[in-house]
């Protein structure tokens, strides 16, 4: 957790309402950090459904494997999250730690270990001492309350500079339902089916299959469309929980993703994911600029995504943004190396709405002073028009500064 807040942090932090059927509590278990909370326990009512998407890394953490194995049950009663230690690349010890943590949480909450979900974030390769949860989780289960959402988001932070929360209220049928979400992530971010850690809760009565469908479609243009440093974490986890308590207020039970009554909820759910994903991009380690990359005129949306990611992940592009230099040559390089259809002589490039290159050459109306002034903005938009088709996509990233090197050079110190 950084002492200084990113200059890109949102200025308005929402008031997070309570969600019936969800209680939260945090504690300092001394897993790695001193003088701060590092454990979160979320307790859910009986009947809560669950869905999840996880990293595609071939070296997943022990908690990721635990959650994958339990997800098919479709139900949840508890979520335990710790920061400071990822419990990844920890062999048999890691599996034993997850099992012991789940047993401790299940006893504290009064449920089966199969209804306990786990997530860990922090240093890779160091054994997690699960005995530190003994006693702590029982105390948290007794102390859990429906509020403290921001405190929960703080407890799961590592190099984050601010807690990331989002909320939405929407009608499901004639009843009002709420969606609350939290996320953490600032480095090792190029998600692949999830973000580093994110948890979404709702009181809507949704089946686990419906939740899974919402997550799978929702991540593609939100969490999977951001990158900070092109590195996909071993621990990427996005879990969604639906308590169903809004059914008592008249919300209809939804068991099919194609149910037309789900339309407004799906839009709001997507909005929460998008909000959290942008906050992750805004909190990139050492970031001073939020960068939006738009690629249009590609042969397909998938092709546009690959080109946009090539630009967003280029250290040369990102350092040019940090230096407030509209170096379109580096953008051309990134387009060319993406391996997707592109025609140099049809290419146009703009920075913050100012076209700097057209038809494969510098734009005749290019004005260095005008562009230099635009590059001082905290948000930079790079738009590339390929002129080949109708494919379009958008990704978010940030600049690459000296502070990123400092943070990661000292990460295990």
Image (cartoon, rainbow, N blue to C red):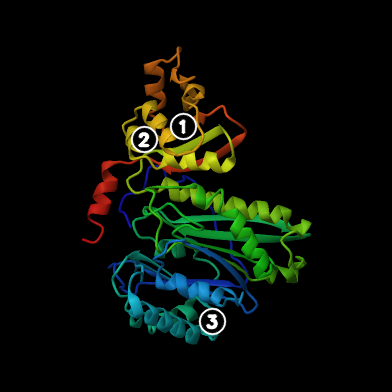
Which quarter of the rendering shows the C terminus? bottom left
User: Disc 3 designates what residue?
Assistant: 114
Q: Is residue 79 above or below residue 308?
A: below
| Residue drawn at point x = 55 percent, y = 39 percent | 393
User: Disc 1 designates what residue?
Assistant: 382
- Residue 128, percent from left and from top: 32, 75
Q: Is residue 343 left or right of residue 400?
A: right
Which quarter of the rendering shows the N terminus? bottom left
Mark 2 neighbour density, 10 Å: few (under 14) some (14–19) many (20 or more): many
- Residue 73, percent from left and from top: 60, 77
The answer to whether the residue labelled 1 contacts the one labelled 2, judged by CB atoms less than 8 Å apart, is: yes
User: Disc 2 designates what residue?
Assistant: 317
Spatial CA span between label 2 and label 3 = 46 Å
Work out whether mark 3 precedes mark 1 in sequence or the reverse, and give the earlier one.
3
Mark 1 neighbour density, 10 Å: few (under 14) some (14–19) many (20 or more): many
| Residue drawn at point x = 38 percent, y = 84 percent | 134
Of 130 and 69, nearer the camera is: 69
Q: Is residue 412 left or right of residue 76?
A: left
Q: How many marks?
A: 3
Work out whether mark 1 precedes mark 2 in sequence or the reverse, and give the earlier one.
2
- Name the element at disc 1: strand
| Residue drawn at point x = 58 percent, y = 35 percent | 299
Mark 2 or 3, which is nearer the eye?
2
- Residue 156, percent from left and from top: 41, 64
Mark 3 neighbour density, 10 Å: few (under 14) some (14–19) many (20 or more): many
Spatial CA span between label 3 and label 1 = 46 Å
């Amino acid at each position: 957790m950084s002492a200084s807040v990113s200059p890109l942090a949102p200025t308005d932090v929402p008031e997070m309402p309570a969600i019936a059927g969800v209680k939260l509590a945090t504690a300092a278990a001394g897993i790695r950090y001193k003088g701060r909370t590092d454990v979160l326990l979320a307790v859910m009512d009986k009947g809560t459904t669950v869905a999840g998407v996880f990293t595609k890394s071939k070296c997943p953490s022990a908690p990721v494997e635990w959650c994958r194995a339990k997800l098919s049950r479709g139900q949840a009663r508890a979520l335990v999250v710790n920061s400071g230690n990822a419990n990844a690349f920890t062999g048999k010890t890691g599996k034993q730690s997850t099992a012991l943590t789940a047993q401790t949480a299940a006893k504290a909450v009064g449920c089966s270990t199969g209804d306990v979900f786990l997530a860990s974030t922090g240093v890779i390769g160091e054994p997690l001492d699960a005995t530190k949860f003994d006693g702590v989780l029982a105390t948290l289960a007794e102390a859990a309350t429906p509020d403290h959402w921001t405190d929960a988001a703080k407890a799961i932070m590592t190099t984050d500079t601010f807690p990331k929360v989002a909320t939405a209220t929407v009608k499901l049928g004639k009843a009002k339902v709420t969606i609350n979400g939290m996320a953490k992530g600032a480095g090792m971010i190029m998600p692949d089916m999830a973000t580093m850690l994110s948890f979404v809760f709702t009181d809507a009565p949704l089946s686990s299959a419906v939740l899974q469908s919402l997550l799978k479609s929702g991540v593609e243009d939100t969490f999977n469309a951001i990158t900070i440093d092109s590195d996909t974490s071993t621990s990427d986890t996005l879990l969604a929980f639906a308590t169903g308590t809004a059914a008592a207020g008249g919300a209809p039970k939804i068991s099919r993703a194609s149910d037309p009554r789900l339309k407004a909820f799906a839009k709001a759910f997507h909005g929460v994911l998008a909000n959290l994903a942008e906050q992750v991009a805004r909190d990139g380690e050492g970031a001073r600029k939020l960068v939006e990359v738009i690629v249009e005129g590609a042969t397909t949306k998938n092709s546009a995504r690959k080109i946009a990611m090539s630009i967003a992940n280029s250290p040369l592009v990102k350092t040019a943004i940090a230096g407030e230099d509209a170096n379109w040559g580096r953008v051309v390089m990134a387009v060319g190396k993406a391996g997707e259809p592109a025609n140099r002589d049809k290419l146009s490039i703009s920075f913050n709405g100012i076209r700097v290159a057209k038809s494969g050459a510098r734009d005749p109306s290019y004005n260095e002073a005008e562009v230099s002034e635009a590059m001082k903005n905290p948000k930079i938009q790079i738009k590339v028009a390929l002129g080949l088709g109708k494919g379009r996509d958008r990704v978010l990233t940030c600049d690459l500064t000296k502070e990123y090197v400092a943070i990661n050079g000292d990460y295990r110190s």
